[in-house]
Image (tube, grey):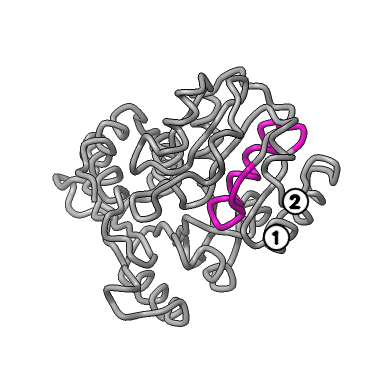
Amino acid sequence: MITLETAPATAVPSLKLGLIGADIGPSRSPAMHMGEGRAQGLAIRYDLFDLTARHLSVADLPALLTEIEAAGYRGVNVTHPCKQAVIPLLDALSPEAEALGAVNTVLFENGRRIGNNTDWYGFSESFTRGLHGADLRHAVQLGAGGAGTAVAYALLKMGVETLTLIDADPARAEAIATRYGALFGHGRIQAGIDAKAALAGATGLVNATPIGMAAHPGLPLDAALLRPDLWVAEIIYFPRETALLKAAQAMGCRTLDGTGMALYQAVQAFRLFTGREPEPARMLQTLQAVPAP
């Protein structure tokens, strides 16, 4: 349990949190954390440290992290392009962050910086709730970037027997397959280049690419490759119904949008930051109430 920053006994317990990343103005994290804090009697201040808005780059991350820590922040979330770059600046990593090689939550605790990763938990929890009982024999994942790294870890952790990773950069998919093969067994994960061939024997599909977002409209693969017996999951949460999900639903597939991953990664981060148990339904209401960017 953490010791919250406190004022006089009559004041509301308070703590300062933040998010480091580039182009993060539309983030829903401030609303979710501050809203849940208010509901629990905490005065949470959640600031955005936008590298783009501050005219900074990843090279400025060491100084920025030192500035934030010195200002008394309890911790920060970390997003693109800092999830890997922050690791050398930390004193310790959670087992999951170490396995993923990526950090999205940093705690400042007793003079130490501790890195965690809640992205994989966010996808896993969302999948378990939204696609309960899905056939996990063979999943195909499109995209092996930062978010894709966490999704692949979650899928293997959940028990996917065979995972095929396909990325525009085959070397990136190969690197993850090698990394996770050592953790979960080399026979369980492989890099692929042909979506049609991979999907022919698959039971499920995950889109972990940006294709489908408002800024990157369209489909990440030919809709003709979908079948009614496939489950299809997205990590994109704006728009909630991507072109892929619409095509999959029209085909009769079970589908999962990206809202749950966004929600549950924040739920887990709230636990780490505050030591308190959040109410996911309440945080979801806040997430959905924030206007679209």
- Tag on residue 288? none
Is disc 1 in contact with disc 2, using a CB cutoff of under 8 Å? yes
Q: Quadrant of residue 196?
A: top right
User: x, y percentage for residue 120?
Assistant: 56, 44
Q: Please check the rendered image and state whether residue 109 is part of the magenta-colored stretch, yes or no.
A: no
User: x, y percentage for residue 251?
Assistant: 51, 23
Residue drawn at the location 75% of the way across and 58% of the way down: 174
Residue drawn at the location 48% of the way across and 44% of the way down: 219
- Tag on residue 170? 1
In the rendered view, tell whether residue 13 sits above or below residue 247: below
Q: Dot 2: few (<14), some (14–19), or many (≥20) neighbours within 10 Å?
A: many
Q: Please check the rendered image and state whether residue 154 is part of the magenta-colored stretch, yes or no.
A: yes
User: x, y percentage for residue 216?
Assistant: 40, 54
Nearer the observer, 174 or 43: 174
For the residue marked with disc 2, what is the amino acid?
Ala
In the rendered view, tell whether residue 201 sits above or below residue 287: above
Residue marked by disc 2: 191
Label count reads 2
In the rendered view, tell whether residue 5 sits above or below residue 206: below
**Farthest-out residue, left:** 10
Q: Which quadrant does the N terminus fall into? A: top left
User: x, y percentage for residue 199?
Assistant: 69, 35
User: Residues in magenta?
Assistant: 141-162
- SS type, badge 1: helix
**Farthest-out residue, front:** 224
Task: Looking at the image, tell me whether mark 1 or mark 2 is earlier in sequence order.
Answer: 1
63 on left or right of 92: left
- Give the alpha-carbon distance from disc 1 to disc 2, as whole Å: 7 Å
For the residue marked with disc 1, what is the amino acid?
Pro
189 on left or right of 203: right
161 on left or right of 20: right
Residue drawn at the location 54% of the way across and 71% of the way down: 85
